[in-house]
Image: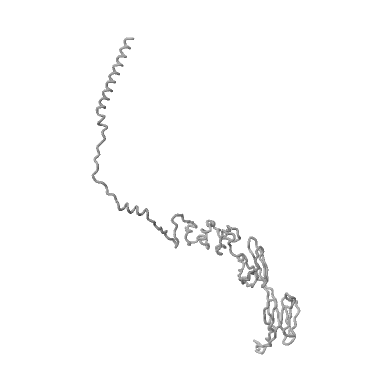
């Protein structure tokens, strides 16, 4: 057994020696061609060289130093901004470009008014909002051309004053008699005693005016007649001219014809947060609670009232028409 193991070792050593010799030979062969493999390939340069576009380069360099006046395009008569986005809102399938005036997103307010004042144009009730809390809505500020974001800028407070109704107080007089003493009766309201006129001028009245004097002065009497429509006979149409000292106005009483000196009152409503009712007679002054101004009721019409504001510096009073409550 030991002899067989010795022969096996010899065989292994022989095979290893042959493999080593073969590897050395291969490496030697490679070393012979190594210098050739390291040689770089020869490149033949092209004979043609591209022409440099000198004019194009000169033009490009010139444009770098040139100032261009960019003119933005126009849309609906207004320049479209080049460096900011345009606000477009879609409503009921229609697009509204708020940079243009038409179509208007929240009529009657203009798109420019909404954008300039930073209003919440996405809110359907933006016209009824009051962002500066001055008591006037955005729509009222738009109509008054005031700033809806500045509480000190707002329309006149009288814009919140309305006529509720005109109240009429009848005051009916009638003249009778064609010789002295003439009789003047107060028919409405009933209960007043008749006044007798014996001479001219003569003061008389059914109540006193400030100062304690009678309200009326009978100034003159003129005998007149007109044909009766039925008989064509002369009919008494004598006239008495009377001064009403409460108004400093004259009027004429015709024999047996009633004359209504009705006094009118205005029932006004002031809407500013809460509703306040003010009743004032024609010719009287009044104040609006919370405001410092004094106003005078100039006239009362069935569908409106005319007032004036008292001015301390002597500036002529400016009349304002107050509409009837909507």
Q: Quadrant for the C terminus, please.
A: bottom right
Return the x and y of residue 271 as percentages of the image width and height. Answer: 63, 63
Q: Left or right: where does residue 44 sit relative to residue 190?
A: left
Q: Nearer the viewer, residue 292 or 133?
A: 292
Query: Does residue 221 lie above or below 295 as drawn?
Result: below
Q: Nearer the viewer, residue 247 or 168?
A: 247
Q: Residue 13 sits in which quadrant?
A: top left
The residue that appears at 30% across and 51% down in the rendered structure is 54
Query: Does residue 200 lie above or below 124 as drawn?
Result: below
Return the x and y of residue 231 as percentages of the image width and height. Answer: 66, 89
Disc tally is 0
| Identity of the residue furthest to the bottom in this view | 233
Q: Quadrant for the N terminus, please.
A: top left
Q: Residue 303 sits in which quadrant?
A: bottom right
The residue that appears at 51% across and 62% down in the rendered structure is 110
The answer to whether residue 272 of the structure is visible from this angle is: yes
Q: Nearer the viewer, residue 287 or 76?
A: 287
């Amino acid at each position: 057994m030991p002899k067989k193991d010795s022969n096996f070792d010899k065989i292994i050593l022989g095979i290893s020696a042959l493999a080593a010799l073969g590897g050395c030979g291969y490496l030697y062969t490679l070393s012979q061609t190594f210098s050739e493999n390291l040689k770089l390939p020869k490149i033949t340069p092209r004979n043609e060289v591209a022409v440099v576009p000198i004019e194009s380069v000169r033009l490009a360099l010139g444009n770098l130093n040139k100032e261009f006046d960019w003119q933005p395009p126009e849309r609906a008569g207004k320049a479209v901004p080049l460096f900011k986005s345009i606000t477009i809102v879609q409503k009921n399938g229609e697009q509204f470009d708020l940079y243009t005036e038409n179509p208007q997103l929240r009529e009657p307010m203009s798109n420019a008014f909404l954008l300039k004042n930073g209003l919440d144009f996405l809110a359907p009730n933006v016209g009824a909002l009051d962002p500066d809390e001055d008591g006037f809505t955005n729509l009222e500020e738009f109509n008054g051309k005031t700033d809806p974001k500045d509480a000190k800028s707002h329309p006149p407070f009288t814009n919140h004053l309305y006529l509720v109704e005109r109240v009429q107080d009848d005051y009916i007089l009638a003249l009778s008699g064609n010789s002295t003493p003439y009789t003047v009766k107060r028919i409405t309201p009933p209960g007043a005693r008749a006044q007798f006129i014996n001479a001219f001028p003569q003061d008389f009245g059914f109540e006193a005016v400030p100062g304690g004097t009678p309200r009326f002065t009978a100034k003159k009497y003129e005998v007149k007649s007109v044909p009766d429509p039925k008989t064509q006979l002369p009919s008494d149409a004598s006239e008495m001219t009377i001064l009403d000292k409460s108004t400093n106005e004259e009027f004429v009483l015709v024999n047996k014809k009633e004359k209504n000196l009705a006094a009118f009152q205005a029932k006004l409503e002031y809407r500013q947060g809460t509703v306040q009712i003010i009743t004032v007679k024609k010719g009287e002054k009044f104040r609006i609670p919370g405001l410092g101004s004094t106003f005078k009721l100039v006239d009362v019409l069935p569908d409106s009232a005319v007032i004036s504001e008292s001015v301390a510096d002597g500036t002529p009073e400016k009349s304002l028409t107050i509409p009837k409550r909507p």
